[in-house]
Image: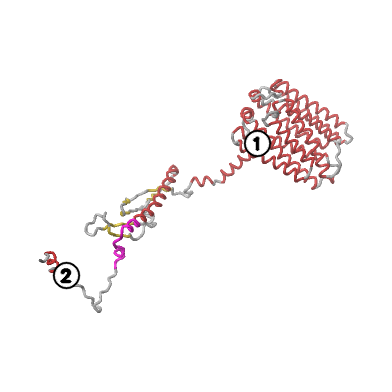
């Protein structure tokens, strides 16, 4: 018995095949560009295409979000904006339509799905650039995105934060602030005093004009640089040990104000101490090296807060430390450095050297006593038993003034007894003028004002500098 379906199939008329005019052979018809891409694809190719679409969309979205965040941060600076929309940024001239078999597609006749990818090329429109990106397929649906970016239409750089980061004025201000902080950290009045004292004492070793030669300047430079490095170590260590006290007494110092961290202070202090010893060692001058070593020991014992040390707590020990460094070591050690190491002469202790040591002993005691007068408030809180805390500001103040006046009187007598006329004039007249100025300034000080006392203390340091200008004339 015949199957009815097969009968219907056999009775069905097929349309005639087209006959090619060229020899009966069928010519292959050229496919349209879009139809070439229409081909059934297996499921793994479906996933491949959808992942490619995802791969293209991801960076576009990331760039859009990044630009939006930048524009949002600078939205208060927008002038004459034009609109850039995210999708027309890069539009191509054609789209690819890819059809492939899928069990999930809505088309029942051919069981296929379409994946359309629109890629945009740069196209500038009148007010805006619209970026459209659409992908459907592989179980993922990408909707049309219209992202608008507002861009500042000015001649300035688009990245304001970067331009500020590399602003030359900001960099210059930062350098100035750093130098100013280090200037205050180094305690410049002590640096100037150290440099002047070494130069002045070195001139005492000069016996004739020919001694002032490149050899002299080299020896002085070696001594000054090494001593300044050690000076920064000593004053820096003192600040590290007195951070809490300086917040009351000297809040302008970098460690007390917070401009320098404790670690920064330790790094600076350690570096300068190492540099000082290294320079003293390579110079090869034993007087210079021992001057640095003794200054290091006394400066450390004066400041560091460990058992049996921190001698600044005790008034007499504190004064002795300052006297030993400023009066004895500076005068004797640096004179011997020039005399024995630079000029290769036997050590001698001349009249000018003895005068300088004696006079600076008075001056060092005055500095040791006076420096605590402005700091009495913080010293009381932290238990520093200075003479100002124990005796009061006024007695210590006038004791310091009296000691300096006595020292100037002795200097007048030394100058008057000099065999050289020019030495008599310079030393006698110079010390008389300094004594008169000291008395005049002392009478105008308000002992109830910390600013007035501090100003007078800095004036004493100026007298200290002036004395070292007069010492080379003592003969």
Label 1 crowd (10 A; few <14 / some 14-19 / many >=20)? many
Q: Quadrant of the C terminus?
A: top right
Residue 14 - label: 2
In this view, the residue farthest toward the front is 1
Q: Which residues are magenta?
A: 31-49
- The reply to whether the magenta stretch includes residue 20 is no
Query: Which of the two residues, 100 or 216, is positioned nearer the viewer here?
Result: 100
Viewer can see residue 301:
yes
Residue 192 x, y percent position in the rendering: 72, 37
In this view, the mark in front (2 or 1): 2
Q: Is residue 456 visible?
A: no
Q: State the residue position of label 1.
A: 185
- Residue 142 image position (x, y, % from top left): 32, 51
Secondary structure at badge 2 equals loop
Identity of the residue drawn at 81% across and 29% down: 432
Quadrant assignment, res 263: top right
Residue 170 located left or right of residue 185: left
Looking at the rendering, in which quadrant would you find the N terminus? Answer: bottom left
């Amino acid at each position: 018995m015949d199957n009815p379906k097969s009968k219907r199939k056999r009775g069905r008329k097929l349309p005639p095949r087209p006959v090619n005019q060229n020899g009966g052979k069928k010519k292959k018809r050229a496919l349209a560009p879009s139809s070439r891409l229409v081909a059934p694809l297996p499921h793994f190719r479906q996933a491949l295409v959808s992942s490619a679409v995802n791969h293209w969309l991801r960076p576009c979205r990331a760039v859009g979000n990044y630009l939006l965040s930048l524009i949002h941060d600078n939205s208060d600076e927008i002038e004459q904006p034009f609109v850039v929309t995210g999708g027309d940024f890069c539009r191509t001239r054609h789209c690819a339509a890819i059809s492939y078999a899928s069990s999930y597609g809505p088309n029942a006749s051919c069981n296929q799905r379409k994946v359309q990818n629109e890629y945009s090329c740069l196209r500038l429109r009148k007010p805006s650039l619209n970026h459209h990106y659409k992908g459907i397929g592989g179980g993922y649906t990408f909707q049309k995105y219209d992202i608008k970016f507002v861009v500042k239409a000015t001649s300035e750089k688009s990245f304001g934060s970067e331009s500020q980061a590399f602003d030359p004025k900001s960099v210059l201000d930062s350098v100035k602030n750093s130098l100013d902080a280090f200037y205050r950290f180094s305690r410049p009045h002590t640096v100037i005093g150290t440099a002047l004292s070494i130069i002045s004492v070195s001139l005492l070793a000069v016996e004739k004009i020919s001694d002032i030669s490149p050899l002299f300047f080299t020896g002085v430079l070696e001594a000054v640089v090494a001593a300044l490095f050690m000076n920064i170590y000593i004053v820096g260590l003192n600040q590290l040990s007195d951070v809490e006290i300086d917040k009351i007494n000297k809040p302008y110092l970098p460690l007390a104000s917070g401009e320098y961290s404790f670690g920064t202070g330790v790094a600076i202090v350690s570096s300068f101490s190492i540099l000082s010893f290294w320079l003293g060692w390579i110079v090869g001058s034993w007087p210079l090296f021992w001057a640095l070593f003794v200054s290091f020991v006394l400066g450390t014992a004066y400041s560091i807060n460990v058992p049996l040390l921190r001698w600044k707590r005790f008034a007499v020990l504190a004064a002795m430390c300052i006297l030993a460094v400023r009066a004895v070591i500076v005068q004797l050690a640096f004179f011997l450095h020039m005399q024995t190491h630079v000029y290769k002469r036997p050590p001698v202790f001349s009249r000018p050297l003895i005068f300088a040591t004696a006079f600076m002993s008075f001056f060092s005691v005055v500095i040791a006593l006076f420096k605590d007068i402005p700091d009495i408030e913080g010293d009381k809180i932290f238990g520093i038993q200075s003479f100002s805390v124990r005796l009061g500001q006024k007695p210590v103040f006038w004791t310091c003034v009296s000691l300096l006046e006595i020292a100037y009187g002795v200097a007048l007598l030394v100058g008057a007894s000099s065999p050289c006329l020019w030495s008599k004039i310079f030393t006698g007249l110079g010390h008389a003028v300094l004594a008169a100025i000291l008395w005049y300034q002392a009478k105008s000080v308000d002992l109830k004002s910390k600013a007035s006392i501090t100003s007078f203390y800095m004036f004493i340091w100026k007298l200290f500098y002036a004395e070292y200008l007069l010492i080379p004339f003592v003969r």
